[in-house]
C-alpha cells in the first residue's frame, strides 16, 4: 500500500525540527532512518499531518569516547546508523554488548538506514537497542524549544511503542557509562532477522576470587517494554554463578514479565522460554568470564 | 512550490536528473513512475521482501522505505547501471545466469544491487557471511543456493581484480 498524504519538511537544525514539532502539536513525527515509521505509514497503520526529515541535520550522528576509568562515557548521536555501530572501533572496544546486539537487527539494508535514536523512540518491545541501552544504563538526551533534559533508559517508556516524550521533544544523543566487564546475549527468533520471540542481555562484574556482583539482567519481548529482572539479579549477587545459583535465579525472572500472545508465540510459551534463555545467557556469561580469566593468567605466566 | 510537491535533483546511474514528486511518494515508485526506470521492482512496500533494493550514496537500501524527496542531492544506482554499454551482461549478471541464480527474475534486481554494494566494500566474505548479508532480499524460486554461488564467485573475482590492480600499481 501507499502512505496517506502528509506534508514533508527537511529540517536543517535541531532548533528547526523542534519548532516544527511544536507547531504541529502532535500531528507530526520526525523521520530518521524510517525503517519502522515508513512501513507503518505505507500500511496506513498511521496517518500524520507532517514528516520532519532530520537526516540532513548536522552533528546528530557520531560516536565519541569521553573520559577515562570510572568516569568513562561514550556518546552516540541519535542519528547514528546501525551500520556505523557495527563498524565502529569505539563501540567494539567500549560497548561490546551493543556491538554484538546490533548484528541481530533486521538485515543489511535495514542496518544501513536505521538509527539508534529512531529505535529507542519507536519503542518496539522486541527491539534490540532499547534492551541493550537499558542493561548498559544509558541516558537519553532530549531537546525541545523549552530546553533539554536527560532521561534514564529505565524511565524512557510509558508502554509498548510509547516513549515518554512530549510531542515537541526530540532525542539528540544517547550517553553510556563505563561498560561492565562481562556480558552475554541470547535471542530467539522464528526466522533470521525477524522480530524476536524473546531476548536476554546480561552483564556483571567478577572479583578475582570468583564472586559476582553488579549483575544486570534485561528481558526483551516479554513485556510492554524491555524490563530488568531485579529479583534474579539480587539472588546472584555475591555468588559464584554455580549451576544451582543460575537455575534458582532464572526461575525468579518470571516475576518480572507480562508476556504477550501473538503470531510468534503464546504467553505461556514465552513464560516457559524466559528462564531457559536466562539460564543460557548466565552460563555464557560465566564461561566468557573464565575464558578471559584464563587468557589473563596465561599472559601473566609468559 | 507547495510542501506537498517536491523538486528532486539527483544523480541517477551517473546522470543528473530533475523531477517532481508528491511528498507521500516513496523512492521506488519515483524511480519507476517519474523516471521510467522500471528495473527496480516493487514488492511488499513494507520493508520485508527487498525487491526494491537500490544503492543510495553507495549503500544498499530498500527504496520503498525512503521518500522520493529524500533522494534530493543523492547518488542513486539502480540495476539499469550494471550492463556494459554494448548491452552485454556484467560479470555479476553473468554469474547469476551461469549459476541459475534466478528463475522468475522478480527478485533479481534486488539481489544484484545488494551484491554490487557488497562487492564495493572490497572485503572477502565466507558463504555464511554472504548468506547473512543477502538475507534482506527474498527469493521464492531458487532456494538461494545458485544466488549464493553467483555472489561468492563475483566477490572472489572482484577481490582478484583488486589484487591485480595493486600489483600493477
Image (spheres, rainbow, N blue to C red):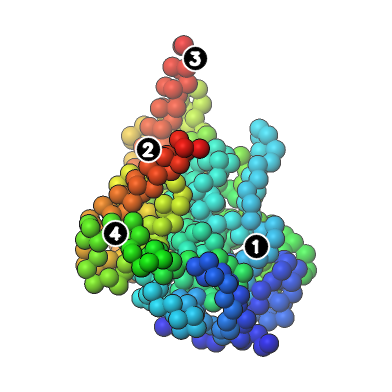
Using the rendered image of the protein, determine whether residue A146 is visible from the camera's viewpoint. yes
SS assignment at label 1: strand
Does residue A149 appear left or right of residue B89 in this picture? right
Nearer to us: label 3 or label 4? 4
Callout 2: SS: helix
Q: Do labels 3 and 4 share a chain?
A: no
Q: Distance between the residues labelled 2 and 4?
A: 45 Å
Quadrant in the rendering for residue A165: bottom right
- Quadrant of res B22: bottom right
Disc 4: which residue: B94
Distance from disc 2 to disc 3, alpha carbons, whole Å, reads: 24 Å
Mark 2 and mark 3 on one chain: yes
Q: Mark 1 highlights which residue? A: A171
Q: Distance between the residues labelled 1 and 2?
A: 34 Å
Have a look at marks 1 and 2 and say if they share a chain. Answer: yes
Element under label 4? helix
| Residue A289 image position (x, y, % from top left) | 44, 30
The residue carrying mark 2 is A284
Q: Does label 2 or label 3 sit earlier along the sequence? A: 2
Q: Nearer the viewer, residue A146 or A53?
A: A53
- Viewer-side residue, A11 vs A215: A11
Q: Residue furthest top?
A: A302
Residue A300 has which mark? 3
Q: Residue at x 51, y 59 (%)?
A: B58
Sort mark 4 into few (<14), some (14-19) or many (20+) by Cα contacts within 10 Å.
Answer: some
Instruction: Pick whichever, A276 or A167, lies toward us.
Output: A167
Q: Nearer the viewer, mark 2 or mark 3?
A: 3
Mark 1 crowdedness (10 Å alpha carbons): few <14, some 14-19, many ≥20: many
Closer mark to the observer between disc 1 and disc 4: 4
Residue visible at 21% across and 61% down? B100
Amino acid at each position: 500500500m501507499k502512505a496517506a498524504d502528509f506534508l514533508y519538511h527537511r529540517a536543517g537544525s535541531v532548533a528547526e525540527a523542534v519548532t516544527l514539532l511544536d507547531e504541529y502539536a502532535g500531528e507530526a513525527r520526525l523521520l530518521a532512518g524510517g525503517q519502522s515509521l515508513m512501513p507503518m505509514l505505507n500500511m496506513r497503520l498511521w496517518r500524520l499531518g507532517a514528516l520532519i526529515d532530520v537526516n540532513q541535520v548536522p552533528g546528530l550522528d557520531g560516536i565519541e569516547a569521553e573520559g577515562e576509568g570510572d568516569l568513562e562515557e561514550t556518546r552516540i548521536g541519535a542519528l547514528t546508523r546501525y551500520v556505523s555501530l557495527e563498524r565502529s572501533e569505539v563501540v567494539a572496544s567500549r560497548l561490546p554488548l551493543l556491538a554484538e546486539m546490533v548484528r541481530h537487527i533486521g538485515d543489511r539494508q535495514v542496518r544501513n538506514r536505521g538509527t539508534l535514536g529512531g529505535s529507542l523512540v519507536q519503542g518496539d518491545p522486541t527491539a534490540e537497542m532499547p534492551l541493550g541501552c537499558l542493561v548498559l544504563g544509558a541516558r537519553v538526551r532530549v531537546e525541545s524549544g523549552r530546553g533539554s533534559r536527560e532521561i534514564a533508559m529505565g524511565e524512557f517508556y510509558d508502554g509498548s511503542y510509547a516513549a515518554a516524550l512530549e510531542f515537541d521533544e526530540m532525542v539528540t544523543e544517547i550517553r553510556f557509562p563505563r561498560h561492565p566487564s562481562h556480558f552475554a546475549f541470547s535471542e530467539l527468533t522464528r526466522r533470521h532477522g525477524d522480530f524476536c520471540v524473546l531476548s536476554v542481555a546480561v552483564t556483571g562484574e567478577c572479583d578475582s576470587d570468583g564472586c559476582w556482583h553488579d549483575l544486570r539482567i534485561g528481558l526483551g519481548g516479554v513485556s510492554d517494554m524491555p524490563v530488568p529482572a531485579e529479583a534474579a539479579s539480587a539472588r546472584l549477587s555475591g555468588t559464584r554463578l554455580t549451576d544451582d545459583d543460575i537455575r534458582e535465579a532464572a526461575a525468579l525472572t518470571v516475576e518480572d514479565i507480562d508476556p504477550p500472545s501473538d503470531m510468534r508465540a503464546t504467553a505461556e510459551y514465552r513464560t516457559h522460554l524466559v528462564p531457559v534463555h536466562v539460564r543460557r545467557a548466565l552460563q555464557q556469561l560465566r564461561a566468557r568470564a573464565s575464558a578471559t580469566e584464563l587468557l589473563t593468567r596465561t599472559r601473566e605466566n609468559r | 512550490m507547495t510542501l506537498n510537491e517536491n523538486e528532486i535533483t539527483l544523480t541517477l546511474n551517473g546522470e543528473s536528473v530533475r523531477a517532481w514528486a508528491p511528498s507521500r511518494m516513496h523512492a521506488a515508485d519515483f524511480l519507476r513512475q517519474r523516471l521510467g526506470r522500471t528495473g527496480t521492482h516493487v514488492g511488499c512496500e513494507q520493508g520485508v521482501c527487498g525487491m526494491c533494493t537500490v544503492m543510495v550514496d553507495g549503500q544498499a537500501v530498500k527504496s520503498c522505505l525512503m521518500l522520493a524527496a529524500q533522494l534530493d542531492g543523492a547518488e542513486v544506482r539502480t540495476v539499469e547501471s550494471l550492463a556494459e554499454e554494448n548491452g552485454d551482461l556484467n560479470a555479476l549478471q553473468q554469474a547469476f545466469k551461469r549459476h541459475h541464480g534466478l528463475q522468475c527474475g522478480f527478485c533479481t534486481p534486488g539481489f544484484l544491487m545488494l551484491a554490487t554494494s557488497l562487492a564495493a566494500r572490497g572485503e572477502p566474505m565466507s558463504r555464511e557471511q554472504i548468506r547473512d548479508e543477502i538475507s534482506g532480499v527474498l527469493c521464492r524460486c531458487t532456494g538461494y543456493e545458485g544466488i549464493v554461488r553467483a555472489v561468492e564467485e563475483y566477490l572472489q573475482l572482484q577481490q582478484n581484480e583488486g589484487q591485480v590492480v595493486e600489483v600493477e600499481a
